[in-house]
Structures are given as structure tokens and as C-alpha cells.
Amino acid sequence: MSETAPRVAIVGLGTIGRIHADRIERLDATLVAGADVSADARESFAAEHCVSTYADHETMLADAAIDAVFVCVPNSVHERVATDALERGCAVLLEKPLAHSLESADRIAVAAAEADAFCVVGFTMRFSNLTKRVATLREEGRLGSIGHVDVDYLRRDALPGEGRSWFTDPELAGGGVAMDLGVHVLDLALYLLEYPLVLEVTGVTRSEFGEYDVEDSALALLRCADGRTISVQTSWRATRSPSQRCVVRGTDAGAEFDVTEPDVEVFDARTTVEETLAVDVDDMHLAEDRAFLEALAGERTELAGTVDDALTVQRVLRAIYDSSDRGEAVRLAEYR
């Protein structure tokens, strides 16, 4: 890696790639290149950020001096881009989920383990100040023993691309809203439980509002080691108010928050008193990208989403789909 500011490239110049580009330019790093199959995306990205752009990531990796690559392409392309970057010694921030399939995710995990560079996965909700505050309550023992986490990520009317984008193509995405939104809150719940062993998953997926071959709604119940549980609800077009909510239930206290809101509500088990903790709503992507760049400098953070964590999430996603198809609970040991 360069002794000066790290040189960063982005593969996939759509919405999330541009979000990362904006944050990189606000941090101690140099955006040097971008790659995308779309000529229009390349042209507008080059004009906005004054960097070289390429039609494919292979040419970019061969042509440009790069320390780190942000992988922001459709899920089915994750494996090819991430492994190529890792083989060239580039650190990788891979947008969630790890891959479009469990088999592809397994291969990425092997490549990451064998690479000299490191790879993290973009579980953005970990970087919310509210998540950090609840994790601190957990570490301080304020919550006692956490037995259940309830999460949801519900949009009111926000189907990606109005049903005509890669998000609703099962070959490119690997699934629907569970892959798109559910992955965020799955990781959030597992993270706050400190990634327990998941034993069994019951899932139901539904396609209710569009002519596409993926689900727009999903529900799941996870049974973990030591009797702990997680419930998950996600939808692109929920017939209720939008929400990015997390409820943590402990033996001494519980905590409830929405990553878009400024407060954490704390419920003490010994009284009926409810305490409101004011927390600044922050830029989660900026915090995530800062932590990644700090890791490049050798300052790793526990907040970073590891490939092992992402592989667990991928197994749970597979179990949700299989459980829905079979109409029964699925043991996660089936996928290890």
C-alpha cells in the first residue's frame, strides 16, 4: 500500500457506488478510478469525480495503481470482481450480501482467506450511532442477558427500479427483498447478539405486488444457541408505516431504536420507567468508509463486517428461502 493516502477504485458506478465515491472524497483517501459496463455511468462518473473510468474491472486493475476496491456491482458479479481484486493484493469492501448464492459466497470466503489483502462486507447499520449506543449498553451489562432481538426493514412503496432492475432478477440478485433489505437487519440482530450459533430457521417469502420472480416480502424466525431468538420482517411495499427498527430484549432491560431516528428507548425490567437516550443520527456510510480506510492503515475495528459474519448471513438467507419452499423449519447445519 502507498505510504500516502490510499488509492481507491470503485467497480459499479450506480447509486451505492456514487455514495461511496462521495464519502471517499471527504476522507483521507484518493479516488483514482471507476469501472462500469454502462457508458453513460462511466461518462457521468468521470465528469463528476475527474477520474479515469473503464468498461471492465480487469482492465482497470491492470492499468491503475490501486490499494483498495469498493465492489458495488450486482450480487452475481461479486465473486469475480472481489476475487480478482484480492488476487492483485487490493483490499476489498464488498457491498452486501456476500454473493447471490451460498456456493458463490463460499468461494469468496476461500479467496479472502487465501489473499494477502483483507476483505470486509458492507453491513452499514453496524455503524449507526444508535447501534453503537446499544452495543455499549450491552457491554456495560445494562441489558443483562439478551434473549431476543426483533428487527424489521420496511419500505412503504420503494420497489427498486419499479420492478425492472437487477434487484428483481433472480439470476443477478439471487433473491428479492431478503437479499436487498433483509440482509441489513439480519446482520444487525446477529451483531447485537454477538453472532451466536444459529441452529434453525423458519422463513416465509411472498411476492404480492409485482410481476417479477423474486419476493417483495419476507418473514423469518431464527432459533440460536442457548435459547436465543431473532425475528425478522422486511418488505419493499409494506402496507404500514416504513421502519428500520430494532428491539433488543434483555433480562435487566430492553432497548428499541430506529436507525433513522435520534433516540434509543430503554425499558428497565424492574420498573415501568422508560428512559430516552438522545443519540446523534450520523452518516453510516461515512463511518463505514472511514473504518475501512483506517483498517488499510492497520487500525482494524470490531465494527467491520467480516467475511465469516457475511457467510453466516448468507446461510441464513438460503435457509429462509428453503424453509419457505419446503413449508418447514430448516436446520442451519445443512449448509455448513
Image (cartoon, rainbow, N blue to C red):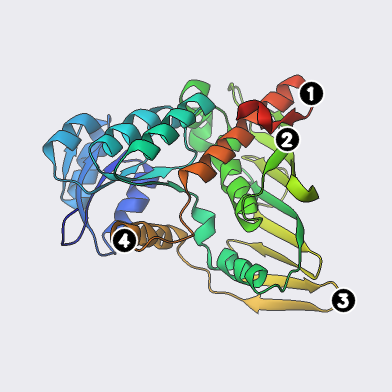
Q: Earlier in the sequence, mark 4 or mark 3?
A: 3
Helix or strand or loop: what does disc 1 sit on?
A: loop
Q: CA distance from mark 4 to mark 3?
A: 44 Å
Q: Nearer the viewer, residue 44 or 11?
A: 11
Question: Where does the image place residue 212, in percent across and percent down from the top left?
Answer: 58, 22
| Residue positioned 53% across, 28% down in the render | 102
| Residue positioned 63% across, 58% down in the render | 192
Tell me if label 1 and label 2 are in contact, CB under 8 Å: no
Task: Please give the residue where the numbered disc 3 appears in the rendered image.
Answer: 270
Checking the image for residue 201, the label placed there is: 2
Q: Quadrant of the C terminus?
A: top right
The residue carrying pointer 4 sits among few (fewer than 14), some (14 to 19) or many (20 or more) residues within 10 Å by Cα, namely few
What's under tag 2, amino acid-wise? Val
The residue carrying pointer 1 sits among few (fewer than 14), some (14 to 19) or many (20 or more) residues within 10 Å by Cα, namely few
Q: Nearer the viewer, residue 114 or 140?
A: 114
What's under tag 1, amino acid-wise? Gly
Helix or strand or loop: what does disc 3 sit on?
A: loop
Which quadrant would residue 243 be assigned to in this image?
bottom right
Helix or strand or loop: what does disc 4 sit on?
A: loop
Question: Is label 1 or label 4 in front?
Answer: 4
Q: CA distance from mark 1 to mark 2?
A: 11 Å
Checking the image for residue 298, the label placed there is: 4
Q: CA distance from mark 3 to mark 1?
A: 40 Å
Question: Where does the image place residue 196, in percent across and percent down from the top left?
Answer: 66, 49
| Residue 95 visible (yes or no) | yes
Tell me if label 2 and label 4 are in contact, CB under 8 Å: no
Question: Is label 3 or label 1 in front?
Answer: 3
Q: Using the image, determine if residue 135 lies above or below residue 165.
A: below
Q: How many marks?
A: 4
